[in-house]
Amino acid sequence: MELKLMAKFELSYCCASDQYFRGSDAEPTLEGWKSGASAVNSMFRKTEHDWTPVMTYLLQEGIEEDDLVSLQKGNAYLARFQCCPLGLVAWQVDFTSSDVVIDSVTIKALATTTQTGQVEWTLQGDDQTTEKLDFVNGSFYCQFSCIVAQESVTTTVIRGSKTAKLTATLSSGNGDAAWQQAQLFSQSINDNDSSLEITITLQDVK
């Protein structure tokens, strides 16, 4: 069997507009975060339009006012239900009907954690073996124990597979606001940038 480097599959999601996009297409492929997910457990999309109290607190904690401009119109993110200790959302791509296999997978995602909140990412291929993804965090502010990062990882751990399943699990946190201490894709409500990007490099099987 000869493997030949082929094309790329690209899927992105913008939490602000709640839309999925394929490649560089300007028009959305899917509407609504659940429409592109293969599994959802105890998760919802939250929009907040009054961030004045939060911004006041952040200013008191030493965050520069210019860094908070994007919050003035509110934000959107995915979180687990308040009553649930754990939330899960997964995305799956299947190439079994094509003469290609996966070479590498690159994931870029916005994740926010405060206090003891946790976001764990895993990737599965054809053999169902779960691999934990170790992201490299980008720049973020943490004066108030908050990590907001554009996380990125590239892996070849499922090379040769025809399927890829990416799972994000949200857990932990303290007190009544524990559910808010682990968030996915948090961004300004008027932001057009992607908060999740999945890029899969494919190999042609001949």
Image (cartoon, grey):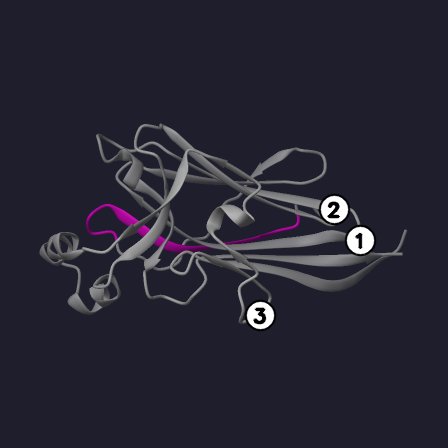
Residue 125 located left or right of residue 166: right
Q: What is the crowding at mark 3: few (fewer than 14 residues within 10 Å), some, or many (at least 20)?
A: few
**Where residue 18 appears, x then y in whole percent?**
43, 56
Residues under numbered marks 3 and 1 in contact, where contact means CB atoms less than 8 Å apart: no
Q: Check disc 3 and report the residue beneath it.
A: 25
Q: Is residue 135 visible?
A: no
Q: Residues within 10 Å of mark 1 (few under 14, many from 20)?
A: few
Is residue 61 or residue 136 the one in the foreground?
A: 61
| Residue 136 x %, y % | 45, 52
Q: Position of residue 203 (x, y in %)?
A: 77, 57
Q: Earlier in the sequence, mark 2 or mark 3?
A: 3
Quarter of the rendering occupied by the C terminus: bottom right
* Disc nearest the viewer among 2 and 1: 1
Residue at image location 41% in from the left, 61% down from the top: 17
Residue 130, by quadrant, is: top right
The residue drawn where x is 54% and y is 45% is 37
Which residue is nearer to you in this view: 47 or 167?
A: 47
The residue that label 1 is drawn on is: 98
Is residue 109 placed above or below 164 in the rendered structure? Answer: below
The residue to which callout 2 is attached is: 162
- The residues colored magenta run 142-156
Q: Earlier in the sequence, mark 3 or mark 1?
A: 3
SS class, disc 3: loop
Of callouts 2 and 1, which one flags the residue occurring earlier in the amino acid sequence?
A: 1
- Amino acid found under the numbered disc labelled 1: Ser
Query: How far apart, in angstroms, are the residues tagged by discs 2 and 3?
Result: 24 Å
